[in-house]
Amino acid sequence: MKSVKARVLLAVCMAVLGILAAAAAAFAAGPNIGVLIYKYDDTYISTVRNALNKALDGKAEITMQDGKGDQATQNDQLDVMIAKGMDGIIVNMVDAQAAAGVVEKIKATGTPVVFFNREPDLNVLKTYDKAVFVGTNAADAGRMQGDIIKQLWDSNPAFDLNKDGQFQYVMFKGEPDNPEAIARTEFSVKQAEANGIKMAQIGETFVCNWDTAQAQTAMESALAANEGKIELVIANNDSMAMGAIAALSNIGYNLEGGSKLIPVIGVDATDQAIDAISKGIMSATVKQDGEAMGNAVAAIMLNMVAGKTPLDGTQYAYDDSGIAVRIPYSPYTK
Ligand code: CA
């Protein structure tokens, strides 16, 4: 039977070993970084998450939470992270309008924070000197579509069905008041025109809520009224582009190996769009580079938790706001 003294000694030894082990683990794992994601069930955000995990692997201990598309849930997850005392926090807002409360809570702890993707009012972020935003520039996706339109026009004179020197197009818009939708709609056409293409819209702009089925219905109506007059389809996203292609293929256009093709351009580079482009039934899309975004968020966060300036030693630069980094889109064609 062990004496009380021996038991106490053993306990002390184990406690000391435990502390040493914990210290070694903390040293090996690096800073604790909390990551709040608006929802895991989002194809694009999954790409960013994977890149983040990869970029932080071995450099930080990551705690990642799924906000499941609910801001109240995300607020609770933030409270837990703050209670645990994270060295840095990365936030992908569920509701960008709710950022003021999030900034206020994190600011009170002095923890550096990087917001990404869903863009809060940058004036809210500017109230905290340890807050940075990493996003894209919505207008760039439109401009890239405009450059693709120029390439398409130059690549095949047959696209000008009525030979009038103008590109007759239909436009599919995501939502009426969404800033991304507005910018993509406006700048795609403006950029094509700046590239010297004469653009002529057929019908009104179809607002289809980013949705394939709604876009298919709208395209069917457009084709019923204007078959043979539509020379180009521009969509704010690939889901709507797929709807337009479904309507076209139902009446013999844009079939794999077929002879009649109306060029269709989207945004996102979804798997479906990439597949359609490989089959030659869709012309192009614009890719949001999730991997580049994840890498940028990771690099900036690691700098901040190390007490360096956010962009120290990186290739990134702030936009005019002085606190936001914009990851460029890239065109995707066959
Ligand atoms: Ca024409």
Image (tube, helix red, strand yellow):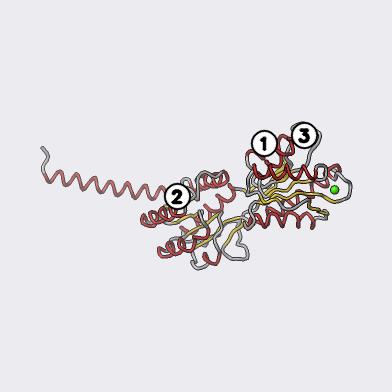
Q: Which residue is mark 2?
A: 60
CA gap, disc 1 and disc 2: 36 Å
Q: Which residue is mark 3?
A: 252
Position of the N terminus by quadrant: top left
Q: Kindly indicate the quadrant of the structure image that contains residue 325.
A: bottom right
In the image, is the residue at mark 3 within 8 Å of ligand 1 by its beta carbon?
Answer: no
Q: Kindly indicate the quadrant of the structure image that contains residue 259.
A: top right
CA gap, disc 1 and disc 3: 19 Å
In the image, is the residue at mark 2 within 8 Å of ligand 1 by its beta carbon?
Answer: no
Q: Looking at the image, which residue sits at the far right?
A: 163
Residue type, mark 3 in image: Gly
Nearer mark to the viewer, of 2 and 3: 3
Residue type, mark 2 in image: Ala
**Residue 220 versus residue 116 in the image, above or below:** above
Q: Which residue is mark 1?
A: 275
The answer to whether the residue labelled 2 contacts the one labelled 3, judged by CB atoms less than 8 Å apart, is: no
Q: Kindly indicate the quadrant of the structure image that contains residue 264.
A: top right
Where does the image place residue 158, in percent across and percent down from the top left? Answer: 86, 42
Inspect this view and state whether residue 33 appears. Answer: no
Where disc 2 sits, the SS reads: loop
Q: Earlier in the sequence, mark 2 or mark 3?
A: 2
Where does the image place residue 265, in percent across and percent down from the top left? Answer: 72, 45
Q: Residue at x 69, y 43 (%)?
A: 217
**Residue 25 versus residue 128 in the image, above or below:** above
Q: Earlier in the sequence, mark 1 or mark 2?
A: 2
Nearer mark to the viewer, of 1 and 2: 1
Residue type, mark 1 in image: Asp
Where disc 3 sits, the SS reads: loop
Front residue of 72/289: it is 72
Q: Residue at x 74, y 36 (%)?
A: 249
